[in-house]
Amino acid sequence: MSDVKDSASVKIKIENKIINVLKAIFDPEIPVDIYELGLIYEIKIDDEFNTEIIMTLTSPNCPVAESLPKEVEDKVGEVHGVETSKVNIVFDPPWDKDMMSEEAKLDLGMI
């Protein structure tokens, strides 16, 4: 049981590190990081510490549609403890401004 708790604890620490990395990556069109912008739908970490980031873009025609996922994959892959990093782009549900955090909305003067 201790191994399961230790593994869960390590996963939580790695996830927090990943979130910090994601908060340092910005959408070039909107001056808000991709995590607070709501582009990250899910962070998956398996028992071997392989990660999968499920994310979206602000639109299918986003000018960084090729470079942003690669940047996320590369930077998450550099997180200590991560074995491999993979990004999956999805458009369901489509992103909209309601997915932004309160912090992002405040930063953009929306509330």
Image (cartoon, rainbow, N blue to C red):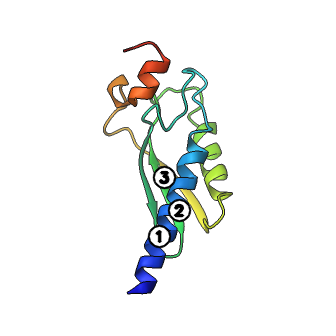
In this rendered view, identify the residue nearer to me: 89 or 102.
102
Which label sits in the foreground, 3 or 2?
2
- Is there a contact, CB below 8 Å, between mark 3 and mark 1? no
Q: CA distance from mark 3 to mark 1?
A: 19 Å
**Amino acid carrying mark 1 in the image:** Ser
**Amino acid carrying mark 2 in the image:** Lys
Quadrant (top left, top right, bottom left, bottom right) of the C terminus: top left
- Is there a contact, CB below 8 Å, between mark 3 and mark 2? no
Q: Position of residue 26 (x, y in %)?
A: 60, 31
Q: Position of residue 107 (x, y in %)?
A: 49, 19
Residue 13 got which mark?
2
Residue 9 got which mark?
1
In this rendered view, identify the residue nearer to me: 97 or 63.
97
Mark 1, other Cα within 10 Å: few <14 / some 14–19 / many ≥20: few
Sequence-first tag of 3 and 2: 2
Q: Position of residue 92 (x, y in %)?
A: 32, 40
Mark 2, other Cα within 10 Å: few <14 / some 14–19 / many ≥20: few
**Amino acid carrying mark 3 in the image:** Ile
Q: CA distance from mark 1 to mark 2?
A: 6 Å
Mark 3, other Cα within 10 Å: few <14 / some 14–19 / many ≥20: many
Residue 53 got which mark?
3
The kind of secondary structure element at disc 1 is helix
The kind of secondary structure element at disc 2 is helix
Which label sits in the foreground, 3 or 1?
1
Sequence-first tag of 3 and 1: 1
- Is there a contact, CB below 8 Å, between mark 1 and mark 2? yes
Residue under the point 35% across and 31% down: 99
Residue under the point 66% across and 63% down: 80
Q: Residue furthest top?
A: 109
Residue under the point 39% across and 14% down: 110
The kind of secondary structure element at disc 3 is strand
Quadrant (top left, top right, bottom left, bottom right) of the N terminus: bottom left
